[in-house]
Amino acid sequence: MIRVASVPADHSYVAHLSPTGETPGDGCDEVIRLPDPLVIADDGSTRWWPPRILDPAWLREHAGEFDVLHVHFGFESFSPEHLREVVEVAHELGKGVVVTVHDLRNPHIKDPAAQLSRLDALVPAADAVITLTQGAADAIQARWGRDAVVVHHPHIVPLDVMATLLLDDTSSRTNRADARSSDDSTAAPARNDRRRIGLHLKSLRTNVDAAGALDALALVADERPDVEIVVTMHRAVADPTDRGHDACVVERAEALAARGAITLVLHEPMDDATLFAFVGGLDVSVMANVWGTHSGWIEMCHDLGVRVVAPNIGFYGEQHAPVLYDLAGRGDEAEDGDAASEDATVDARRLADTILVAVDQGRAAPADVAERRDERDAGARVHSEIYRASIPTR
């Protein structure tokens, strides 16, 4: 048995690093991951971040409970110096250290140096490095001289849910498109024969150019009145008293909705089942990120059979072949594969043209459930082998 202190543990990506249990002799049932030590927020709720595991004192106190420290994400709360100490303490305690590079550039932080400086502390000192695409592995080799093992992103949608939703794709799309949001106060428009485009703005993450994407959708609405466009965002974005409020984006979206160009859906954060149902009712999902490395959203859409229009940034293009568009103001490729320009924005005309191409292509083929299961089990085996090799021999 190999005990892994995973940062974090409570995340769908990490959960799907465990074998499905459906493959005989998968060889990795000896791996267990510790639950996240909970952090109590100011409002009394609990969460996993900032991760307590990345505290040298926690590592020392719980040294008898784990064999490997595996860092995924959530370490932006700590300085590079602190992270170096974490790795040093883990090694002093005789623990293996594994780092999976999900993001060469943090999607929540504009300054690219913020993430790279922390990876400078983690990647060279780790016993093993994992990443999700070959392009990212090449970038890791170029910057740090480390050979990263490529393990592709596992499925996002649970396999049993995929099997149920995709059993009858036509009827399930109708049912999924009619699903109500998690607070049951809003609903997606009823399904019809028009192709549906969706833009999910959520809480307006730092790396999203919502205004540019809305301008692109306005062009699409003018040029293709036969399509249906649904824009969703968290209700807090439209609340002037909320710190996430963005008056410009809300006004632009409301103006488009008022003239019938889009259907605007304001909602509380969706639970997974509601999100899968809503996105699964789309033909095309539009991403408006202006920097990034890998995307769980692309993986989810692949699971659901929804075609993705995505910016040509990071290594999105290596994840299930989304329909890519170029950003405005994008400089030459940086060595980490991200846009060299920090001022990249969505070019409305380019994005609109790409959306139209995707609409004409139609809905993507849904993921094969058996293939996704096999991918997950193969990834679990690789992780098991990496963990075992990373533990110092005593």
Image: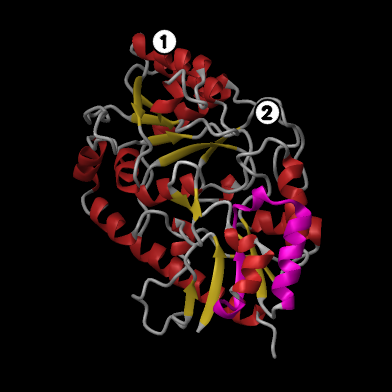
Residue 54 in which image quadrant: bottom right
Q: Residue 371's x, y, as percent?
A: 39, 64
CA separation in Å, label 1 and label 2: 25 Å
- Seen from the viewer's position, the closer of residues 255 and 115 is 115
For the stretch drawn in magenta, the main secondary structure is helix
**69 lies left or right of 378:** right
Query: Sequence-wise, which precedes: disc 1 or disc 2?
Result: 1
Q: Is residue 34 magenta?
A: no
Q: Is residue 318 visible?
A: yes
Q: Residue 325's x, y, as percent?
A: 58, 33
| Element on which disc 2 rests | loop
> For the residue marked with disc 1, what is the amino acid?
Ala
Q: Residue 334's x, y, as percent?
A: 77, 42
Q: Residue 367's x, y, as percent?
A: 37, 54
The residue at the point 76 percent across, 64 percent down is 85
**308 lies left or right of 135:** left
Are the residues tagged 1 and 2 within 8 Å (C-beta)?
A: no
| Residue labelled with disc 1 | 255
| Residue labelled with disc 2 | 344
- Res. 375 mark: none
- Seen from the viewer's position, the closer of residues 119 and 371 is 119
